Amino acid sequence: MKRFIAFFLTVLLLLSLWGCSGNNPEHTTHNHTHTEAITAWDTTTFEENTVTLPNTETTSSQNNPSSESSAPTDPSAVILSDTLERGTTEGNIYTSTTLGLTFEKPSEWTFAEESDLAYYSGLLSGGFGDFAATASENPAVYDMYADHKESGTTLSICYENLFITVGNALSAGEYAGIIKNAVSENPDSTVTFEGEITLGDRLYSKLTVKTASDNDSTLRTYYLTQVGNYMATILATVPEGAIFDTDSMFR
């Protein structure tokens, strides 16, 4: 299970790298798989981490046999307790009915097109089709990605299907703990903020990680909220010293 979490965190970090480089990946022909694409990113740090996942399935089934966590772990047998509705974009405003929030993109930022989002999600068709059905059949799908190439700031919204990646549901707090575990194994990264925040209609676990390099430092803020058997992750990547306050971009 640790490798699934490592895979997902690696994908999130890879998107940050693409944003910082100021270039979208070349994907018009889709002649390679998403897994092959992410091997260009250094996954060593995450692959070597010892991440202990909470055994929520065992605990929950012992304490409450009728609980949601006692559902079978075979993804094909799982009926997701919440279906996902694709967010919509109109002008500079992204709206998510699923999350009950809106994101106002600064005018100098750029939204990724659907073909880009599908590529980030590992889909080769260039689109999602039925978004809820696609989410139920894949480890993770990206609903929104925006970036400011000049500063290297990026922001994405992704839904991870927990019954595919880890075999049972996790709370946002438990998932934040997994990220903290991974960060603790990286001497160049530290957690600078940990708490909760309300964005739109939902409460999120918020975790900010500072990663230092020889030339600069980057702040990655994870906003995590559980949506049924999915983990919704809003990831904001901001070079330290940039003026963007990502909290204020949501309402």
Image (cartoon, rainbow, N blue to C red):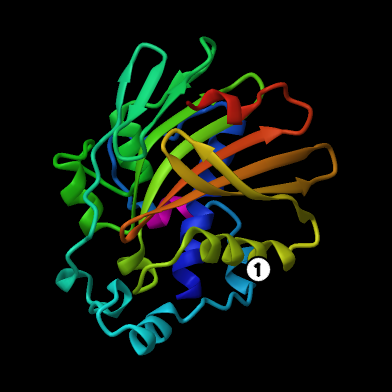
The residue that disc 1 covers is 181
Residue located 38% across and 43% down the image: 120
SS type, badge 1: helix
In depth, the one of 119 and 138 nearer the eye is 138
Residue 230 percent coordinates (x, y): 34, 56
With 223 as the anchor, is 217 left or right in this view? right
Residue located 48% across and 71% down the image: 3
In depth, the one of 117 and 184 nearer the eye is 184
Overall secondary structure of the magenta section: helix
Disc 1 marks a residue whose amino acid type is Asn
Residue located 21% across and 58% down the image: 137
Task: Give the residues in magenta.
Answer: 35-39
Residue located 65% across and 50% down the image: 195
Q: Quadrant of the N terminus?
A: bottom left
Residue 35 percent coordinates (x, y): 39, 57
Residue 191: quadrant of the picture = bottom right
Compared with residue 63, is residue 166 higher up or lower down, i.e. above or below? above
Residue 88 percent coordinates (x, y): 28, 25
Residue 166: quadrant of the picture = bottom left
